[in-house]
Image (tube, rainbow, N blue to C red):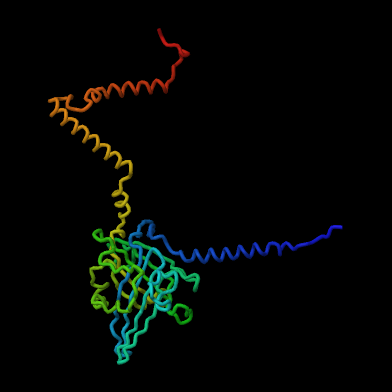
Amino acid sequence: MRACTSSSPSSSKSPSIFSVSILSALFLSFSSLSAGFDCQDVAADRQHFDFNQLGGPHRVHWLQDPDIVHQEQFNYTFTLDICHPLKRDKGVPKVEFCHLGSRVCAVRETIDMSDKNNRTINPIDIAGTYRMDNGRTIDAKFSLLRNSKSHSDAGREGVRAELHGGRFPFKDNKNGLDQMAIIEFVCDKDRTGLENDEKDDGEKEDDGKDGEKEDSKKLRRREDSKCEDSDKSLRFCSYEVEEQEKGKKVSVLRLEWRTKYACEDALDDAEGSHWGFFAWFIIILFLATAAYLIFGSWLNYNRYGARGWDLLPHGDTIRDLPYIFKDWARRVAGAIQGPGSRGGYSAV
């Protein structure tokens, strides 16, 4: 008598369901790291731009006016990468840099102006995708400057980018303040966007003295100018709390980036400036043929005293080219048409 064993369908399928759920969770986790937008194809009001050449970490500084009451001063270092999530510099502690997935990160150094002269460092996540931490995304929005409602943008050519997702304090959902970055890519055909750029290679140690450079003294924002007075293509404009829709307050970082890649005809110019292999092949073949004819003619003139058609190398063949081509075309046409209706017999 054969013993019968029974198994529950749900128990046999539960391991596979469990493994699928794990794989799904892992997939979502890894996909969240790369969530964002493609800087090679930025679409703004049906116009496409390629900002791939502007990728990589870039830095701007702002030394805020001192607070006499609290005897302190804030020194900000803003690091952004519009193409990839930022990576922490070598030697910088985790607590002094933004969370994984950040595209725009501010490091605020608080300088105590009293006799104690203490310094504290606070990272501020401004924009990025943080699904593994708090589920917030960058929610990037792009629009053309000429379509902006602001009168100051009238007649300007370029792209306005709005990047979201940041918060400070980062995990304080109750009392924290939402962060936002607005980058205005302004068309400037004479700039690549990397002029006088402070590009961080991610390898150097951060000694906390970047804000003490002589250049940082010129980066203080003045009320009579929209952005800093600088020869850099990437310029700091402001970082302050602004009131958005429905009275919501958001801390907004505003930057201006002058570059030729923000021009609406940038992609057309790039396509027209790169010739394909076939075009180069035709040019090289033409130059080689011209060099051969010129050298051959000079040789025939000096060696044999040739004149006219005799100057050209293989002059007889060149003169016969029209007849050779006609004969070849006649043969091809005959091969395509076939022997005709004579059944293979030719006329006698």
Q: Is residue 278 above or below residue 104?
A: above
Left or right, 101 with reference to 282: right
Point out the image quarter for the N terminus.
bottom right
Farthest front residue? 303
Residue 284 or 169: which is nearer the viewer? 284
For the point 34% across and 78% down, the residue is: 240
Please report the residue visible at 22 percent of the width from the left and 33 percent of the height from the top: 292
Taking depth in this image into account, of 164 and 321 the one nearest to the observer is: 321
Give the x, y percent position of residue 210. 30, 76
Q: Is residue 277 left or right of residue 95?
A: left
- The location of residue 102, given as percent across then percent down, is 42, 70
Residue at the location (33% across, 41% down)? 278
Displayed quadrant of residue 299: top left
Q: Is residue 293 above or below residue 162?
A: above
* Residue closer to the observer: 299 or 131: 299
Frontmost residue, 132 versus 201? 201
| Residue 206: percent from left, percent from top | 34, 76
Q: Residue furthest bottom?
A: 115
Q: Quadrant of residue 226?
A: bottom left
Where residue 271 appears, x then y in whole percent? 32, 50
Count all numbered tags in the image, as a single digit: 0
In percent of the image, x 74 and y 63: which residue is there? 8
- Check the picture and name the quadrant holding the C terminus: top left
